[in-house]
Image: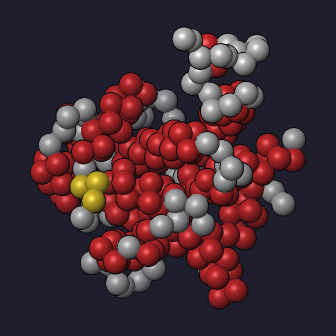
Amino acid sequence: MPKEQPSGWDPEEKKAEGPGEGKEADKESEKGGFLLKAARKILHATGRVGYPEEIPSGEKKETSEKEKKEAAKGFLGLKLGGATLVGVIALALGGAIISLQKLNALDKTFMKGYNIAFGGGKGGGGKK
Amino acid sequence: MNFSSFFNFFFFRRREIIMEFEDFFKVNVIDLVGFSDAPEDVKQSFLQSASQTVLEAIVDRIDFELPEEKKEEFYRVFRTGAQNEDMQAFLKENVPNFEEIVGEETGRVKAALLKAAEDLKSA
């Protein structure tokens, strides 16, 4: 005997956890995509510490975006310390990296990187 | 607060600011952008995309820093399916400050995401 379905049941909504929650997840997903796009714009707008904002045309061979994306995929297999690079980045974004003993040494270079970024140039000594 | 003073606020090296800087470093980007209550798959997808953004920023940075004659080799070594040993050897020889670059770009992306989230909130 077939199970009694609640009225208004839509088989398309099966993947959602409950009524309305699929739409909430879509909204959050959309917000995430928007935030990432906005963050990329901010990164491009602020340029890099010590770098010129505009590369004069003709002076440098411009690498295509496709080549750069391909290179980014290549980094997926790179190991850093005892873990993969992308795993370390995810941990750093997640705020968990400090608590991992295995990555303790790496933590220091991350901190150095953070400090160098906007601290007014590279510090003296201590570079391994 | 304009954007450059935002960065100075977080990263200027004064003792009282270092504490706030460390808090920023320790906090989860998911919480920073207000996704704490989002479904797990949305959080995972967002973190994955954010990590990808960091990788692209790292490539951009290395591309900028490398001399022209080394770029072709870089893009030859770093592609889908690249071998870890080849990548390690290239970085050791040509990008000695690689780990610092990774830390720096991760911080920039995290800060940019926070700024984007704050702009969205105030919009």
Which residue occupies the extreme front position in the image?
A1
Q: Is residue A116 visible?
A: no
Q: How many marks?
A: 0
A97 vs B81: above or below: below
Give residue A41's position: percent from left, percent from top.
Answer: 64, 38
Identify the image quadrant of residue A128: bottom left
Give whichever of A117, A4 is nearer the camera.
A4
Residue at 72%, 19% in the rendered image? A6
Give residue B6's position: percent from left, percent from top.
Answer: 74, 62
Q: Is residue A8 visible?
A: yes
- The type of colouring in the image is secondary structure
Give whichever of B9, A26 is nearer the camera.
A26
Identify the image quadrant of residue A105: bottom left
Give residue B29's position: percent from left, percent from top.
Answer: 60, 56
Give residue A58's position: percent from left, percent from top.
Answer: 44, 28
Left or right: B72, with A8 as reference point = left
Residue at 75%, 55% in the rendered image? B3
Residue at 46%, 47% in the rendered image? B51
Residue at 65%, 16% in the rendered image? A4
